[in-house]
Image (cartoon, grey):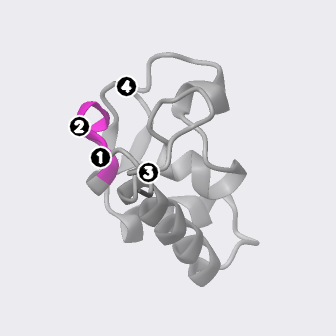
Amino acid sequence: MIFAPIQIQDYVKLHLKSNPGDKAKEVTAQLQSALSAYKLGRRCQCGAPIWVIGASQVGLMCFTCITGEADPSSDYEIAEACDKLNAPLRRKAL
């Protein structure tokens, strides 16, 4: 999966252009929460790494489960979460 990388602040600007009723602070907080979950190894119910941008809006799911599409090449992902092949795995408690 190859996404178009974007920084959080740049994505928030784009999001607000399309969704003028949303608040930058809330969108940023949602993205940061989803990014934290990604970094902790949270996965979609199908086992794939979560799509941070989509997960910030609809729940902790992957690109395919959110959109029904397999190719994200024209879609954004937060730059820190673009490397899905080396996504962190959640460690189980001992």
Q: Are marks 1 and 2 in contact (CB under 8 Å)?
A: no
Work out whether mark 2 precedes mark 4 in sequence or the reverse, and give the earlier one.
Answer: 4
Magenta extent: 81-87
Mark 2 residue type: Asn
Q: Residue at x 54, y 35 (%)?
A: 62
Mark sitting on residue 92: 3
**Foreground tag (1 vs 2):** 2
Q: CA distance from mark 3 to mark 2?
A: 18 Å
Give the residue at the far top of this rendering. 70
Q: Are marks 3 and 1 in contact (CB under 8 Å)?
A: no
Q: Residue at x 57, y 37 (%)?
A: 44
Mark 3 residue type: Lys
Q: Are marks 4 and 1 in contact (CB under 8 Å)?
A: no
> As drawn, is 91 to the left or to the right of 5?
right
Q: Quadrant of the C terminus?
A: bottom left
Q: Tag 2: Cα neighbours inside 10 Å, few (<14), some, or many (≥20)?
A: few
Residue at the spot of label 4? 73
Work out whether mark 4 precedes mark 1 in sequence or the reverse, and give the earlier one.
Answer: 1
